[in-house]
Image (cartoon, rainbow, N blue to C red):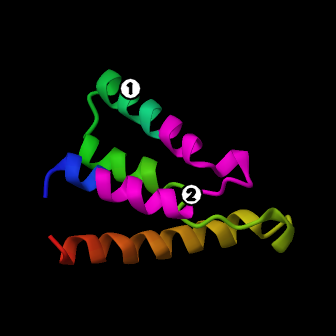
Amino acid sequence: MNLSEIEKILSEKISQVASAEDPAHDFLHFKRVVKTAKDLCKEENAKLEVVLPAAWLHDFVIIPISTLRFTTRNTEATALVAGQTKIFMVILALND
């Protein structure tokens, strides 16, 4: 599977996750992050195959702020994103 195929899959998955109700996590937010990541990759000569999935999946799990206590929000969200991202990437690899 090449990088453009991976990006298409990631984009499709994120389009299902992105929230139109939360402008901070709508699909355009993810596209802006990915564009910035690509620009930084060129500038810093980074590995796009590492940075691109990270950019697409950085908010893979969106947790409404109202459902979490302020002091635990970042820790809980980070753990959920990491877990769900790992599962998704394993499935992606298995389908290759």
Q: How many marks?
A: 2
Q: Earlier in the sequence, mark 1 or mark 2?
A: 1
Quadrant for the N terminus, please. bottom left
- Relative side of 72 to 89, left or right: right
Residue in the image at 70% along x and 46% along y: 24
Specify whether residue 4 is painted magenta. Answer: no
List the residue tagged with mark 1. 39
Q: Would you place residue 18 above or below residue 96 in this image?
A: above
Residues shaded magenta: 8-33
- Relative side of 47 to 15, left or right: left
Q: Quadrant of residue 59?
A: bottom right
Residue in the image at 51% along x and 54% along y: 58
Residue in the image at 67% along x and 53% along y: 20
Q: Residues within 10 Å of mark 2 (few under 14, many from 20)?
A: many
Specify whether residue 26 is painted magenta. Answer: yes
Residue 16 percent coordinates (x, y): 51, 63
Q: Quadrant of residue 28?
A: top right
Q: Residues within 10 Å of mark 1 (few under 14, many from 20)?
A: few
Residue type beneath disc 1: Asp
Label 1 and label 2: CA atoms lie apart by: 19 Å
Q: What mark, if any, has residue 59 been given in the picture? A: 2
Describe the element under mark 2 as helix, strand or loop.
loop
Q: Residue furthest top?
A: 43
